[in-house]
Amino acid sequence: MSEHAPLLKTENVVVEYGSRRKPNRVLHEVSLDVGAGECVGLVGESGSGKSTLGKAILGLVPVAGGRIEFDGRDITHLKGRARRELASEIQVVFQDPYGSLNPMMTVGEILSEPLSTAGTGRTEARRIVSEMLERVNLPGNVLDRYPSEFSGGQRQRIAIARALVRRPRLIICDEPVSALDLTTQATVLDLLIELQRDTGVSYLFVSHDLGVVRRICHRVAVMYRGDLVEIGDGEQVTRDPQHPYSRRLLAASPVADPARQAERRAEWLELREAHVTA
Ligand code: ADP
Ligand code: MG
């Protein structure tokens, strides 16, 4: 049982691609909860259906069966205006820090767009945007610059700031650090952890990297070919998984070796230290 009240609940969610006549079922009755202020990891090899679950929650793919609830409300088939309004509660950060930001827009425009869409006044929008830049450790002078002028890590900070401006209660993080080098991964993960502590936002954190998930998640769910095969405490699932598939995933992960694991942990601590004192 989660100690947090569920904010998000998926119940037997089914998603099929392909045509109605020849459906390809990629999610088989997936049931998962995310509590307020909780980070739930979703791991599994490429093609297992992790992103599809995120898209189903965001309303980007149709749900063929089951139910998705947010804060007690059925959002499974929400469309149009009601779906757009949900953007103030559920946001997303994608893997690709190059493709996910409009190259034609300045950082200032990227960050204020969700606010103008929501009808926020310009003065208030400017105030929120500078607050969010500060939160993600970017200087105020980035506002007139374009995404192409930034590194991958900085772009993810911009993407995170954009996800935060409407003060959502849930952020779907779909492999948000997978495209970054190890050092940058560490600082972006630390940032996500800090933001969660400060704001109480929940994360559904999709990753194929058990080391990353162990670092940030309270609970971890393991997906295998569209089924959740294991869900439990993050530390336990990433160290001593019970399901044979989870064990294989752990064995295949670059942190399977205990010595390497200890090393990786030390690395993290060192990086954290450097980050804090810098
Ligand atoms: P993951 O994020 O775990 O790598 P995905 O959710 O992206 O997995 O994909 C799950 C399965 O659905 C894969 O077999 C993939 O090929 C298939 N798939 C994903 N998106 C589409 C799509 N738009 N149309 C058809 N099949 C898709
Ligand atoms: Mg994916």
Image (cartoon, rainbow, N blue to C red):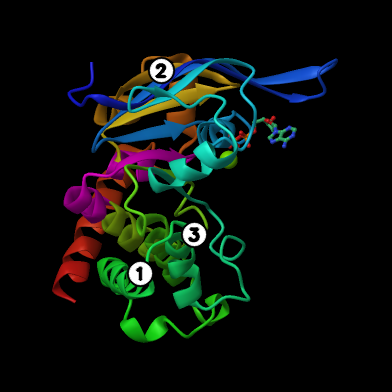
Q: Secondary structure at mark 1?
A: helix
Residue drawn at point x = 57 percent, y = 36 percent: 55
Instruction: Specify the amino acid type for callout 1.
Output: Ala
Instruction: Specify the amino acid type for callout 2.
Output: Glu
Q: Secondary structure at mark 3?
A: helix
Q: Where does the image place residue 225, in percent across and percent down from the top left?
A: 60, 21
Judge whether residue 266 can be spotted in this image.
no
Q: Secondary structure at mark 2?
A: strand
Q: How many neighbours does mark 2 have within 10 angstroms: few (below 14), some (14-19), or many (20 or more)?
A: some
Q: Which residue is mark 2?
A: 230
Which residues fall within the magenta stretch? Answer: 193-216
Residue drawn at point x = 31 percent, y = 81 percent: 139
Q: CA distance from mark 1 to mark 2?
A: 42 Å
Q: In which of the image's four quarters is ligand 2 placed?
A: top right
Q: Tag on residue 125? A: 1
Instruction: Specify the amino acid type for callout 3.
Output: Thr
Of the numbered discs 2 and 3, the one sitting upstream in the chain is 3
Q: Work out whether residue 96 or residue 198 is closer to the camera in this orientation and state it.
A: 198
Q: Work out whether residue 147 or residue 108 is closer to the camera in this orientation and state it.
A: 108
Q: Which residue is mark 3?
A: 117
Q: Work out whether residue 190 or residue 103 is closer to the camera in this orientation and state it.
A: 103
